[in-house]
Amino acid sequence: MIRRTAQQIADWYLAWADALDAELDNLKLQKLLYYTQGHALREFGEPIFVDELQAWAHGPVVPSVYRRFKHAGSSSIEVDSTLPSTFSWDDYRDVESFLQRVWNSYAKYASWTLREMTHREPPWLEHFSENERDAVIPVEALRAHFTHDRAKQ
């Protein structure tokens, strides 16, 4: 598996949402990135993207992706103005079915529902602090949670 940036994974989700004529706001995108990273650790044994996740008040966030789409607020992100001209579906063939599975598992939920889901999971619960900004959710915390989650299934 080629390890990418969270921005690249976000681009795939935006293009996929656009192809399905589905709405995708920044909050939902952040939660999709969190679940993507967790499931990648479970399925591939390694992160799918290099960026760190942080525990923010509204759940796990990749700061660079959040800042990129902050202008959209709680509205759906406009793909035409944000997707790089260099985007190509071919660049994602190695992870396409994996990303589709994550999308099918989580994109059906409302953004706020996904927020609430992450608030009940150890990676966020154990690393969020109202008194600390930029608290990192360690990859090992994600790995432990998502690997343990598999054992329960």
Image (cartoon, grey):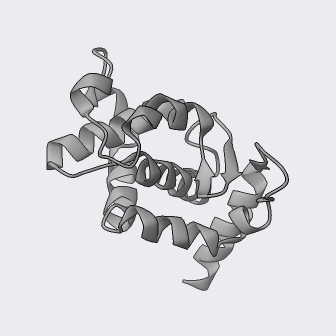
Residue 120 found in image quarter = bottom right
Residue plotted at (77% across, 50% down):
138
In the image, farthest residue toward the right: 131
In the image, farthest residue toward the bottom: 152
**Residue 2 seen in the figure:** no
Q: Residue 22, percent across and down?
A: 20, 52
**Residue 132 seen in the figure:** yes
Choose between 14 and 75: the one closer to the eye. 75
Residue 48 found in image quarter = top right
Q: Residue 139, percent across and down?
A: 73, 50
Query: Count of labels shown?
Result: 0
Q: Quadrant of the C terminus?
A: bottom right
Residue plotted at (47% across, 36% down):
70
Is 141 rendered above or below residue 87?
A: below
Q: Residue 147, percent across and down?
A: 66, 68
Is 98 rendered above or below residue 149?
A: above
Q: Residue 148, percent across and down?
A: 68, 74
Choose between 118 and 87: the one closer to the eye. 118
Residue plotted at (37% across, 67% down):
105
Residue 114 horizontal side relative to residue 123, left or right: left
Residue plotted at (61% across, 84% down):
152
In the image, farthest residue toward the top: 85
Is 132 rendered above or below residue 89?
A: below
Residue 102 found in image quarter = bottom left
